[in-house]
Image (cartoon, rainbow, N blue to C red):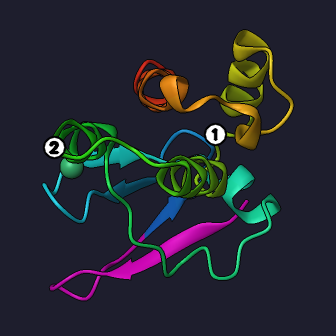
Amino acid sequence: MLYIKTKLGDGRIVRSGIQENNTYAVCSECGKEIPIHLGEVFSADNADPLDADIVCPECTRKHFAKQKPSMEDIVLLATALCRFGYSKQILRLYDEFGISAIQELGVQDYGVYAEALLSAVSDRN
Ligand SMILES: [Zn+2]
């Protein structure tokens, strides 16, 4: 088991096991806590999994409400979600939209697809 070792103010040392369901990140915009699938983060093709700027689904939604997502936005969003361990949810959405790659989406589907991506990761727990 991997664990984190933290030295408290009184000198005691606390060890916390790193598990699939106890690893979190903080949204870089609103500070909300987001659950992270660490195992998948490290198994994904990740340049540096520990140095990632994470934005929660709600903040991403607000961003897309102001400015309609482009293909680039959707690719970035899907890539980011893969990096944070949501590759299964993204593959499931490919099936639902009848596509084998994001680039097959029509422009009219960008907004719906972005919303579906965000819902898939919000509903996970
Ligand atoms: Zn946020």
Where does the magenta region start and end?
Answer: 1-14
Q: Are marks 1 and 2 in contact (CB under 8 Å)?
A: no
Q: Mark number for residue 66?
A: 2
Estimate how packed mark 1 is, as few (under 14), some (14 to 19) or many (20 or more) residues with alpha carbons within 10 Å: many
Q: Where is residue 64 drawn, in percent x and y?
A: 27, 41
Q: Mark number for residue 33?
A: none
Image quarter where the C terminus lies is: top left
Estimate how packed mark 2 is, as few (under 14), some (14 to 19) or many (20 or more) residues with alpha carbons within 10 Å: few
**Residue closest to the eye, 51 or 39:** 51
Label 1 near ligand 1 (CB < 8 Å):
no
Secondary-structure class at tag 2: helix
Q: Nearer the viewer, mark 1 or mark 2?
A: 2
How many numbered circles does the render carry?
Answer: 2
Q: Where is residue 65 drawn, in percent x and y?
A: 20, 36
Residue behind mark 1? 86
Does 10 lie within the magenta span?
yes
Q: Kindly identify the residue that appears in the image at 54 percent across and 33 percent down.
A: 107
Looking at the image, residue 2 sits to the left or right of residue 51; the answer is right
Q: Kindly identify the residue that appears in the image at 58 percent across and 53 percent down.
A: 84
Label 2 near ligand 1 (CB < 8 Å):
no
**Residue closest to the eye, 34 or 56:** 56
Q: Where is residue 79 drawn, in percent x and y?
A: 63, 55
Disc 1 to disc 2, C-alpha distance:
25 Å
Earlier residue among tags 1 and 2: 2
Amino acid under label 1?
Answer: Tyr
Does 9 lie within the magenta span?
yes
Q: Kindly identify the residue that appears in the image at 53 percent across and 46 percent down.
A: 74
